Amino acid sequence: MDILWFLPSMGDTRFLGTQVSRRNTTQAYLEGVARAVDSLGFTGALLPTGAGCEDSWMVAASLIPVTKRMKFLIAIRPGSLSVTLAARMAVTFDRLSGGRLLLNIITGGDPVELAGDGTFLTHDQRYEVTDEFLTVWRGLFSGQPVSYEGKHIHIEGGQLVMPPVQTPYPPLYFGGSSPKAIQVAGEHVDLYLSLAEPPQMMKQKFDQVREVAARAGRTVRFGVRAHIFVREKAEDAWAAAEQVLSLADADAIAASQAKLARFDSVGQSRMVGLHNGSRDSLEVSPNLWAGIGLINKGVGTALVGDPDALAERIQEYRDIGADTFIFSSYPHLEEAYRVAELLFPRIPGWAESLGAANAVFNQDALPSAWQ
């Protein structure tokens, strides 16, 4: 099992929907979060992409020298970047980081933002591009020259001169809930990533991906993307979750929901459907809270509770096939420590797998003065 954290390259905060407590992006802050991820036992961290973020490739590259073991999950948007250029970028990063690159294939769900980047394709056309992109990608990493003429992509004699550290290429993560996305996932990617929904809703998607992959003679891993609020007592965890929204007034929520209404992402619409813009009945399944989606785009759900309850919820996702979890919380620096200290020891096999990185949480390993 892998557990990743999140690098807040768009800035950080204690309160959503307001500028109160805003932490602007600085190199020092990002290094602080990255060092926490690196030392606490997380597998790595996801870096966001979009107009409101620092560039994920530049941020990740700047953090290679200050980290030793964490992996960087960096986004590629097939409709915005040449496949051969993206492949060369990936090879370089993988080599310079010593094999610490993971790739998140993003089709994009906001037509307004995509237009700002010069992409004017429909939802289904973007998945057509992604399918062609990944077809060429896999050919390039075979080490042979690739010529390809598709509906959207045309290259002649594309080739990679240097190989990556990871073979055949850095693992490909990918999410999407539409039929087109399910098809791409089953045919191309290594890990299908879903925004956290009630487990039985997610199982349906996982099973659909499995079916497509089986027809293609492939297997696919599965992952869950969620926010998380963990405290020693359940009531404190719920109070922490509610506090994050405590300064978000009705106008801020309405503005956020109006923006989300323009998205053509099926996954985003499923997130909105869990709360429908209302603060009522936000616990959509045990310990799964849809409050974040009132303000945020993307992942709108959070696991909320005490360590034992959240370990049970994680096991439920593992039971339907998930072996990777990408968590985040507000603010990300402090909450990384909470998750590592409170939750990691409750996950069977996880604490034992951390080795030296987990020694700080082993009381027997501490000098007596610190126990």
Image: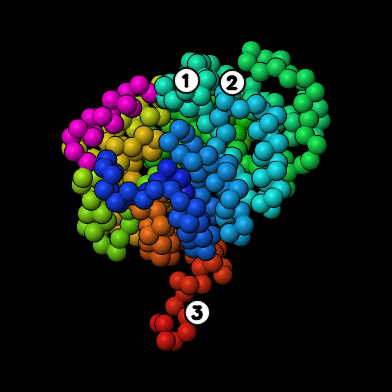
Q: Where, quadrant-wise, is the C terminus in this rendering?
A: bottom left
Amino acid on which the number 1 mark rests in the picture = Ala
Residue 56 percent location from the top left of the image = 53, 41
* In this view, 307 is above or below 189: below
Q: Give the distance between the C-alpha atoms of the residues marked 2 and 1, in whole angstroms.
A: 16 Å
Q: Residue furthest top?
A: 151
Q: Give the distance between the C-alpha atoms of the residues marked 1 and 3, in whole angstroms.
A: 55 Å
The colour scheme used here is rainbow
Residue 333 percent location from the top left of the image = 41, 57
Secondary structure, mark 1, is: helix
Secondary structure, mark 2, is: helix
Q: Which residue is mark 1?
A: 115
Image mark for residue 365: 3
Earlier sequence position, callout 1 versus callout 3: 1
Amino acid on which the number 3 mark rests in the picture = Ala
Residue 101 percent location from the top left of the image = 62, 46
- Residue drawn 69% across the image and 50% down it: 96
* In this view, 81 is above or below 369: above
- Residue drawn 52% across the image and 31% down it: 106
Q: Is residue 262 magenta?
A: yes
Crowd around label 2: few <14 · some 14–19 · many ≥20 (10 Å): many
